[in-house]
Each structure stands twice: as structure tokens, then as C-alpha cells.
Amino acid sequence: MSSRRYTYQTTLCFGTDGEPGYSEVECKFAYSVAWGSAPSRDDPGSGSEIEDCELLTVEGKPRPWDMGYGFITDDQFADDCVERVLDTEEDDMIAEAADWAVADEDDARERRHEDRREGL
């Protein structure tokens, strides 16, 4: 498959629920997937991995986010968000990308079929 970019939206939690400073932040990420290989007799295969994950929006707003309240930069905040989403939701992100990849293949197959049919 190609190096297509996917997007993933989720809510990240910061702090401890019920404690001062706790917040939930809606974040949207862009990423690509290095697709793994299926196992075979001679190869155990490999799992798919997220590559080039970046934070796009926070609460629907593009950079600058100013979520560090003067304590951390936007770059540090983005790195923290990427680390959190990969730690907790990488499998969901890969599954969502796989769904999109299958849909893309189905669309391409349908277009080829229509092109052949129209060419008759």
C-alpha cells in the first residue's frame, strides 16, 4: 500500500479525573502507516506501525494552541500528545487506517470496472 496520510481524532486526558488541573482535550492527528507483513512458513511476519504522526488541531484550532500556559512550548505539547495517542490508541489508529485503505482499494476497483464497462 502507499504512504497515504490518514487522520485520527480523539480526546486526550491530562491529569487525574476529579483533581485540580484535570482536562480533556479534543485532538486531531495526521499520520502514515508502515504496513506489516502476514506470517508465512519462512517468515514470522511483522506488525504495522504508525509513522510520521503529527498533531494537527486542538479543540478544532490549528497551531498556535497555547495549551502549555507558558510552561511548555507548542512543540513540547505536540510531542506529549503524539506520545500519549501512540501509547494508548495506536492499534485503533492502525485499524482505522486499514478500513480507509480497504475502502480506497474498493473505490479503485470499482472505477477500473466502470472504465472497462464504458470502454466496451
Image: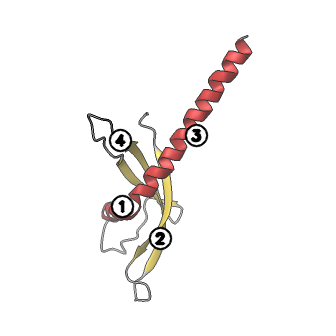
How crowded is the residue under tag 2: few (<14 C-alpha within 10 Å), some, or many (20+)?
some
Q: In the figure, 10 relative to 117: above or below? A: below
Disc 4 versus disc 3: distance between alpha carbons? 18 Å
For badge 3, the amino acid type reads: Ala
**Within 10 Å of the Cα at label 3, are there few (<14), some (14-19), or many (20+) other Cα atoms?**
few
Real-space Cα separation, disc 3 to disc 1, in angstroms: 30 Å
Q: On the image, numbered disc 2 is attached to which residue? A: 25
Q: CA distance from mark 1 to mark 4?
A: 26 Å
Mark 3 or 1: in front is 3
Cβ atoms at labels 4 and 2 below 8 Å apart = no
**Inter-mark Cα distance, 3 to 2:** 29 Å
The picture places residue 68, in percent across and down from the top left corner, at 36, 72
> Gap in Å between the C-alphas at discs 4 and 2?
31 Å
Foreground mark, 1 or 4, reads 4
Q: Residue 78 has which mark? A: 1
Look at the picture and state if 113 lies above or below 101. Answer: above
Residue situated furthest top in the rendering: 120
- Percent x, y of residue 75: 32, 60
Front residue of 61/43: it is 43
Q: Which residue is mark 3?
A: 103
Label 1 close to label 4 by CB (< 8 Å) = no
N-terminal label among 1 and 4 = 4
x and y, in percent, of residue 114 in the image: 69, 22
Q: Residues within 10 Å of mark 4 (few under 14, many from 20)?
A: few
* Occupied quadrant, residue 71: bottom left
Q: Earlier in the sequence, mark 3 or mark 2?
A: 2
